[in-house]
Every structure is written in structure tokens, then in C-alpha cells.
Image (spheres, grey):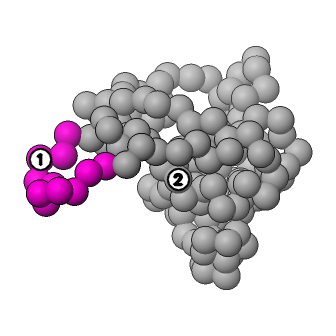
Amino acid sequence: MLGGGHVEFSERLKMEDHVEALSSGIFQCSGPMFGGSKANLGSMACLRISNISIKVVIGTERSQNLDQEFFRAVGIEPKEYSIICVKSAIHFIADYNQITNNIIFAILPGATPCELKEIAYTTLRPGLRIAKTRNAN
């Protein structure tokens, strides 16, 4: 079973997979946002979903993927893949912009939507307004 940490937004996914790599989850970030900082995601694994070529990287500690080293910690070189999905708000852009000019945001239910207009702000100061978000491209 995978996911479903926030049951109000998603269900756990039952899947059959194969473990391709394991890691301690301790590594050095190299991207512009936290370059040089030590990360500890707890035990990590690279799973390949059975009968298809999709790989999933998981860690025992929750974190937004903000650095390509999250993949490299389990032997994946991000620039060698044509599609990479990260679960992150915007933290990933600084590092992943170095390997692609094509970033697509998925708008899904969750605690922190990418579209600010979807947040039900109830305590904004008078006169404060939310500006339109711009595409990362």
C-alpha cells in the first residue's frame, strides 16, 4: 500500500512492485535551494510498479522534493528520464529548471493547492489581494 497519508484527500493505493534500490536516505543536496545541506529522508526505496516501467521513490520521512538528489539517493539520474513527477508545491523549480523547460503543474485535491485562488482566505488584511499565479515556463 502506498500513499493516503491525508485520508481526507486521497486513498491508499494497492500495487504490486519490485524493489530496485534501497538507501539510508541521508544525502547532500546539490541544487540552488538547499545546495550543501544534509538531507535525511529516513529509509528510502526505488520501487518499479510491476509490468510497467513507472518507478516510484519513497522515503519514511515526509518532505517536498526540492532537489534532484532525492532521486539520485536511490540510483536514478533525473536527466535520463523523459518524464519526472515530483510531489512538491514550487520548491522543486530552482533545481529541475536546469534539466527542463517544460514544467507542468497538476492541480489535485490537497492541503496546499498550487492555485492560490482555490484557498479560502478568511483573514486577509483589508486591501490585501491575491495576485494571479504565473506559469513557471
Q: Are marks 1 and 2 in contact (CB under 8 Å)?
A: no
- Above or below — where is 101 with respect to 118? below
Instruction: Looking at the image, tell me whether mark 1 or mark 2 is earlier in sequence order.
Output: 2
Q: Which residue is mark 2?
A: 90
> What kind of element bears circle 2?
loop
Could you tell me the amino acid type at mark 1?
Thr
Q: Residue at x 76, y 17 (%)?
A: 51
Residue occupying the far top of the picture: 51
State the quadrant of the C terminus.
top right
Q: Which residues are magenta?
A: 120-130
Q: Amino acid at mark 2?
A: Ile
Q: Is residue 126 magenta?
A: yes
Q: Residue at x 63, y 55 (%)?
A: 93
Query: Which of 75/113 is in front?
Result: 113
- Report whether residue 5 is seen: no
Q: Residue at x 11, y 57 (%)?
A: 126
| Residue 122 tag number | 1
Task: Name the foreground residue: 76 vs 118.
Answer: 118
In terms of image quadrants, where is residue 86?
A: top right
Prevalent SS, magenta region: loop
